[in-house]
Amino acid sequence: MIIATDAQGYVDDAVDGIAEDGVYVSSEVPGAAQLHDQLVAQIGDESIGVAVFSDNAALEASGRDIVSQLAAAHPECQTIIVAVGDDLSAGSRVLEQGEAMRIANEAETAAGDVDAALTETIQGVIAASPAPSASAPDAGPFIGIALGVAALVAAGAVVFGVARSRRRGRAAPGRHPLPEPVRTHVHTLQTLAAEYARAGSAGVPQAGEVAHEVAVIAQNTTELFARLDRKGEEGQRATAAVEYGETLRKLTGALDRDYLLDILTRPDLWDDPVERVQEVRSAVSSFSSELVENIKQVNARRGLHFQVSLDGLMGRRKELQEWDRAFERADGDAGPTPHGD
């Protein structure tokens, strides 16, 4: 990561960073490398570019100006999110005028720090974005901006685009690369990864390691389904959607802020905290290893094999059993899912 030294250094570095993997974090930002990886995992395969700067970047340009410049440099990005110090700015060509600003502004108001605000903004943009089959406007001179909690809606003349430049392939037309309910669980994991990362930064033991492991699972799950799409493996994609939908559901329950994160944060309030942590981390490790093996199987055009089950983990702890039953009751009230749960 390069510290800017010339008049356009910050923006130029961000242009290059977003071209590489969709995310740029200035080396002047504390914990830059960890935040970069965290944001990459949160974005996944979405068409979002994110740039994070220290307050010094304001000497070069305002957050709104940086959003405009990055949007012009990356017409392949549907949405651009920028943080300059504690101030967030955002613009999108696929959301209603001012909607990206509203999402970023609300996130900045509610979040305790800029990392949390970025996470909430990314999740809000993903949730508000239209389905891939919806036709996005090819023009429409607007940009939604958020500058601080008292920001005003502003209009500009930026038009931007369609898909992240780092993508090596495309999903089938008219659908998201991740099928439901896998997409929902991956987004939950991305949010949890950010929460564990913040806990790790605050000194909670093991939280930083868990954040990395969860972020890798979210990223590799997206990669698995993207490769299944590119290779035209419709049958295996359907099978994987069922298997991963169920297993990811249980994994997110074990990683939830009311279970593992709470145990790590307040072990004194739990029975057998060391054993509980080991159970969940072993399950995370096993699932992550199987996920990599499944990707290798797709690459070799072999049939997918699913061997890891989290039923044992859910069955050992009454708290997780209650969570699982509550989830199933809520799921039943909402109607059957695509895989018939």
Image (spheres, rainbow, N blue to C red):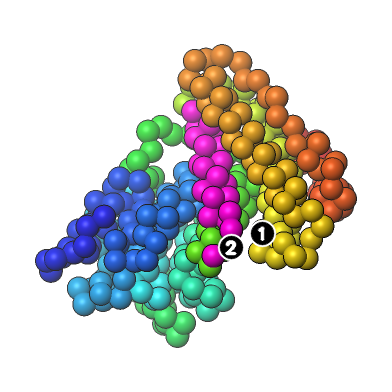
Q: Which residue is mark 1?
A: 264
Q: Mark 1 and mark 2: span between their CA atoms?
A: 7 Å
Q: Foreground: 230 or 52?
A: 52
Q: Quadrant of the C terminus?
A: top right
What's the residue at 59%, 35% (across, down)? Answer: 288
The span shown in magenta is 203-228
Q: Quadrant of residue 151?
A: bottom left
At which x and y percent is residue 339?
Answer: 75, 34
218 versus 303 height, above or below: below
Of pointers 1 and 2, the one earlier in the residue sequence? 2
At which x and y percent is residue 189?
Answer: 60, 50
Q: Is residue 210 magenta?
A: yes
What's the residue at 75%, 65% (across, down)? Answer: 268
| Marks 1 and 2 close (CB-CB < 8 Å) | yes
At which x and y percent is residue 47?
Answer: 42, 49
One can see residue 142 in this view: no
One can see residue 31 in this view: yes
What's the residue at 46%, 82% (across, down)? Answer: 149
307 versus 315 height, above or below: above
Q: Which residue is mark 2?
A: 204
